[in-house]
Amino acid sequence: MTNRQIRYRRSSTVLWRRCSQNVLLLPRGTERPLSLSGSGVDLWQLLEETQTLQTTSNLLAKRFDTDVREVTPSVVEVLDQLVKVRAVELTVS
Amino acid sequence: MRHSFHPALLALASHRLKGALRQMPAQPLSDDEWAPFLDDVRRHRLTGLLADATKGGEFPVTSSQQQEGDDAHIASMTHVLMLENFLIDSVELLGRAGIQVRVLKGSAVAHLDYADAALRPFVDVDLLVRSEQFDLATETLREHGYQRYFAEIRPGYDRRFGKGVSFVSPGNLELDLHRTFAMGPFGLRVNLDDLWSSGQDFTLAGTPLSGLGPDERLLHACYHASLGDYPPRLLPLRDVAEMLLYGERDEQHILELSRAWGGEAVVARAVAMAWELFDIADVTAMSAWAARYRPAKRDKGRLAVYTDGDTSYAAKSLASLTALPRIRDRVALLRMVAAPDPGFLSRRHRSRASWLIAGFKRATRRSEDHR
């Protein structure tokens, strides 16, 4: 039985800058930049490398010293939004 | 060098430069000082350095000043991202027409010369194209809705004698299309083949782009810092210092090119200004050379054409005569300047007479020691 995993990483076609406490993102084809703040900035840093949802949630939970079960729903929500605007791409392997 | 820069502004512009001795303020600026200071930070494109210096605590600020500085940086970087999107679109557009392009200043310098591109804001897109493709490039942009700010003096002027053309896009973003580094005599003496003999690649949003080679990029930074604005803007001077102190450059090659281009006075002025204004103690071969360099009388006169704030477009055009070795080019330039197209005149002068008077009035100047 094949165990396929969804992996996330920054899209190669997104323009971005770290900006004070925020990260500004502009996926190609989007008119106005989007802004990530707080833990969204940490998430963006993690996505410099390809990550699974589980790894991402574990790392953020550790960084913020909290339970991974509390973090995971928020991570799912942010990742879904970033995939939707094409700032993050996902692969299945 | 005489200047009126606020000491805190110079300290900020030299933030993170190794060997720079300017001292950051010991305490936050007063409310009366802060507002004009922040205006200067924006004007000199130092919002990235301010954000970095306040975040690290090197530049003390109150909480409201921190917020205002951060807001200025966010606004600046928002515009930068939109400009990079526009840059890619413009390069692709020109590429489809077979036009070869080098990215100048802005995005190229931010990504190739700064450890953190967010430290290096910019407000427009600058592209270099070859002279023989210049007319095709302007026509291609025009066909896609880009509008020139100013009409050409006469057909053929831009391709033969001009520095470049400024456009505004349908999305209201500015693109400066360059043929050489500067208008006037120093721009005409640049050997344009040298600018295309090497390049340095970088990638934006997955799109491969090409900037000038490292040595040519430093030379362009020097031309821009020396000749671009009067009084000089601090960010271009920061570029010069950043490139010399941190980049891998062949200083001997740079000096050879500047000599071949007749641009030693330009380069020396930029490097000396950067070293003096930022009070940099570290010495490089070029900073030592610039400190010793004394321009010839003729070059002092040429520099004065750029550094006198009153010098008109007409005067700089006429000063170009000294840089044209061929009689037929001088005649062609004179004809174009003496009888510009009405469309060009209507945006710049009341009449042809006032255009000519402005040109002859400041065509040559006695020099001052600006160092």
Image (tube, coloured by chain):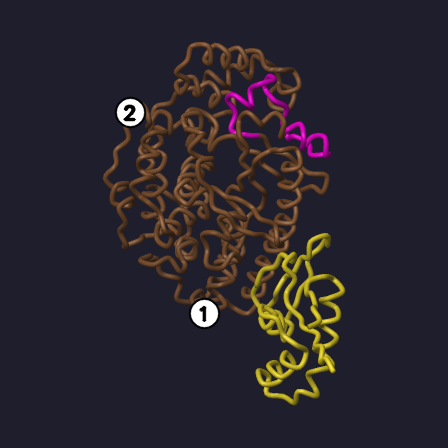
Chain colours: A yellow, B brown
Where is residue B261? Give x, y as percent: 36, 29
Kindly identify which numbered label has been placed on residue A37. none
How far apart marks 1 and 2 lie (CA) works out to: 47 Å
- Which region of the structure is painted magenta? B138-164
Viewer-proximal residue among B205 and B218:
B205
Q: Is residue B259 above or below residue A28?
A: above
- Residue with the mark numbered 2: B297
Q: Tell me the residue at 45%/13% (across/down).
A: B330
Query: For this view, does B7 lie left or right of residue B128?
Result: left
Q: Quadrant of the N terminus of chain B?
A: top left
Kind of residue sitting beneath label 1: Gly
Q: Quadrant of the C terminus of chain B?
A: top left
- Could you say which quadrant of the image residue B344 lies in? top right
Kind of residue sitting beneath label 2: Lys
In this view, the residue farthest toward the front is A1
Q: Is residue A74 above or below residue B101?
A: below
Viewer-proximal residue among B171 and A26:
A26
Q: Tell me the residue at 74%/82% (across/down).
A: A1
SS under mark 1: loop
Where is residue B201? Give x, y as percent: 50, 48
